Image: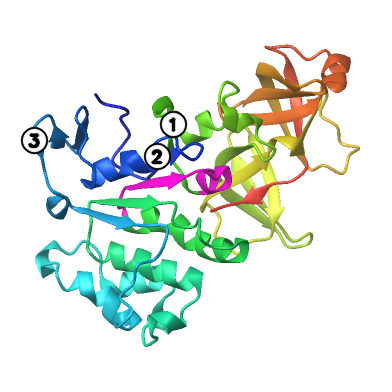
Amino acid sequence: MRLFTTPASGVTALFGHSGCGKTTVLRAIAGLLRVDQGRVCINGETWQEHKQFIPTHQRPIAYVFQEASLFSHLSVRRNLEYGWRRVAKEQRRVQFDTVVDLLGVAPLLKRATHRLSGGERQRVAIARALLTSPQLLLMDEPLSALDHNAKQSIMPYLETLHDELGIPSLYVSHDPNEVARLADHLVFLEQGRVKACGLAADLLTRLDLPVSRYDDAAAILEGRVSSHDPTYHLTWIGMDCGRVAVSREDLPEGHYARVQILARDVSLSLRAHSDTSIINILPAKVIDSRDINPSQVLLRLQLVDGQMLLSRITRRSAVGLGICEGMTVYAQVKSVALMV
């Protein structure tokens, strides 16, 4: 039975609580788990169905586990070269120096693996996986064993990988922030079943899915750098629905940008105010609402360009403003986080 279909491009996140089946799906795709009923088909090629089964070593994949399993008797360079040298030159889709630069491991090449930090070890493990020139990269919660600082240090490298190398990835996570920052597509699993599948930006704002009710629930908006304000040290991200400001970033105008906006950072008004300290104000339409507890309401807002936003406000405010579906409001965004 086909559980889900997702594009063979970008990053697809398998998301859900522990025990929902994320790793089981990944292991089946890798050929590490043989299931009685099921089908694995990649780019039109069937890897598993009924009695047909392509063994793991014949599948053009790379697998990054939670713990970086590096060869302790080899240096970082020799760890990286281990898989790279086993790929015929004419079949190499990525170059050694390209991967080393993308993951920032050049200063580590001469080191022994026992002298690496957790974040450095995981970057080396990801680089080693990429140097096997896989057609599909499987990542099983690669940041779960890292502390907060290590996660934040490695995240920018992960954000650039699929854009730079063009290798599709399946990324297992139970962390909504990781999904928001990395995923283009999302498969939401619940108790061994696919609850929803689609664009990450859409699913993260669906009020019928638990992720929208998390305390750090957020929406993802896409745009491009439109201008810089040197006086106030701001960078403006332009979209068809308007623009939002982030702290000044050294990015060229026209550069693709992805921003994260937390639901709790979006207040609403019936008019576009100019006498306010909030500079990010976007017109929107209320398309759905849910009570998330006796005092708070969660609203799904559609911007002029079709992108979605979440707003968490008090039920008192919603009643006072007369909020209802189909109503036009102004989303006042207190904080915007630039992700790419």
Q: Which residue is mark 2?
A: 22
Q: Are marks 1 and 3 in contact (CB under 8 Å)?
A: no
Q: Are marks 1 and 2 in contact (CB under 8 Å)?
A: yes
**Residue 168 horizontal side relative to residue 176, left or right:** left
Badge 2: residue crowd in 10 Å (few <14, some 14–19, many ≥20): many
Q: Position of residue 269 (x, y in %)?
A: 82, 26
Q: Amino acid at mark 2?
A: Lys
Marks 1 and 2, how far apart at CA: 7 Å
Q: Residue at x 86, y 22 (%)?
A: 317
**Depth check, front residue: 55 or 164:** 55
Residue 174 is inside the magenta segment: yes
Q: Residue at x 50, y 69 (%)?
A: 119
The kind of secondary structure element at disc 3 is strand
Q: Amino acid at mark 1?
A: Leu
Q: Is residue 103 visible?
A: no
Q: Residue at x 31, y 36 (%)?
A: 7
Q: Is residue 124 visible?
A: yes
The correct choice, above or below, for 46 with respect to 91 in the image is: above
Q: Earlier in the sequence, mark 3 or mark 2?
A: 2
Q: Which residue is mark 1?
A: 189
Q: Amino acid at mark 3?
A: Gln
Marks 1 and 3, how far apart at CA: 26 Å
The kind of secondary structure element at disc 2 is helix
Badge 1: residue crowd in 10 Å (few <14, some 14–19, many ≥20): many
**Residue 331 horizontal side relative to residue 16, left or right:** right
Q: Which residue is mark 3?
A: 52
The kind of secondary structure element at disc 1 is strand
The correct choice, above or below, for 324 with respect to 161 in the image is: above
